Amino acid sequence: MEFTTTDGVRLHYTDQGRGPVVVLLAGIGSFSVVWQPTIDFLLQQNYRVLTLDARNQGLSEHTAQGLRISRHAMDVAELLAFLDIANFIGIGHSMGAATWWAYASLFGTRQMQALIDIDQSPKMINDARWPYGFKNLTQNNFFTLLQAPFGRATVQNLPDSVYYQNRALQASHPYDPELNYPFLLDHALQDWRDVIIHLQCPFLVVNGGQSPFFAPRFGPVVAALAPKGHHCMIEHSGHLPMTECPQAFQRQLQQFLRQLE
C-alpha cells in the first residue's frame, strides 16, 4: 500500500492484523521483509502490525527531497495520522530506532506505549567521553568512513524465506547509497541522548552480542539513560538480531510486551 506525504513523496507501507498497534521501522537501505519473523510473531500475539519503507529505500519512492532524519520522523507521523492511529508501540532497527528518537523529539511520547531500539547507538561518532559509536567513526574520519562499504552486517545466516525475498527485492528495487548519502550524513551527525533521558514510555535496548557495527557494551549504557530503560543482548547475533536469531529475540520481545499489559 502507498500514501503520499505532505511534500509529495510516495511511501510504501504494510498494515496487517487487528489489536494494539506496533510500528516497525527498518535500518538504512533495508526492505521491510527483514521484519517477517517479527511480523509473524506479533500477528500470532494479536497485534496490528505496520511497516513503513523510508523514502529512498524499500518500495518507497527514490528522491533527493527531504533527506533528513527529522523528515523521516515526519513521514511516520503523517502515516499515523493517515491511518488515524492514536497509540502505538514503536520498534526501530538501526536507523529506524534513530527515526523514533527524532519522532520523540518532535512529537513527544504521549502516543507511544513503548519504544524498542534494536542495535543502534544514540550517538554514532566516537569521542573520549563516548566510545559507543559506529565502528571507529570519529570527527576525523567521518566523511571517508561513511563513504566506504559497511561490510557484512550479520554473523548468522538469515532464514531462507527472508534471504530469497530480500535478494529479489534488491534486484528489482536496488538501494542507491549515493542518492541517500546526504541522509546518512545527517543521521550519523545526531546525538539523541538528550531525548532518551526524557522518554516517558518504557524503553528497551536490544543489541547483537557480535554486532560488527556497535560494541555490545553500548546497550546497558543507553538503557540506563532512560527513566524506564531496559536492556537485553542476543548473544550470537550480529546487527539484525530480530532476523538472525528470531526465537531468542521474540522471547525477549514477549517478556517486554507482557510488562505493558
Image: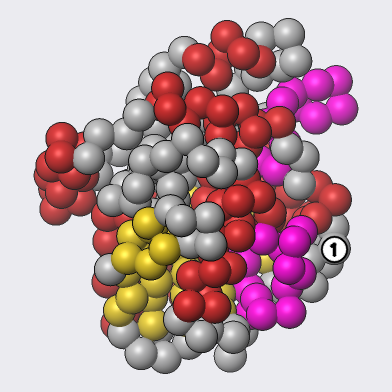
Instruction: Please identify the quarter of the rendering in which residue 40 is found.
Output: bottom left
Q: Is residue 224 above or below residue 208?
A: below
Residue drawn where x is 28% and y is 68% of the image: 1
Q: Is residue 18 above or below residue 147?
A: below
Residue drawn where x is 68% and y is 54% of the image: 102
- For the C terminus, the image quarter is bottom right
In the drawing, does residue 128 fall left or right of residue 251? right
Q: Position of residue 257 (x, y in %)?
A: 54, 78
Mark 1: secondary structure: loop
Instruction: Please identify the quarter of the rendering in which residue 258 is found.
Output: bottom right
Q: Position of residue 133 (x, y in %)?
A: 68, 30
Q: Which residue is mark 1?
A: 198
Tally of numbered discs:
1
Residue drawn where x is 36% and y is 41% of the image: 62
Q: Position of residue 113 (x, y in %)?
A: 64, 79
Nearer to us in this view, 223 or 233: 223
In the drawing, does residue 127 fall left or right of residue 52? right
Nearer to us in this view, 261 or 109: 109
The magenta stretch is: 103-132
Q: Is residue 113 above or below residue 24?
A: below
In the drawing, does residue 46 fall left or right of residue 1? right
Instruction: Please identify the quarter of the rendering in which residue 19 is found.
Output: bottom left
Q: Is residue 251 magenta?
A: no
Nearer to us in this view, 212 or 99: 99
Q: Main secondary structure of the magenta part?
A: loop
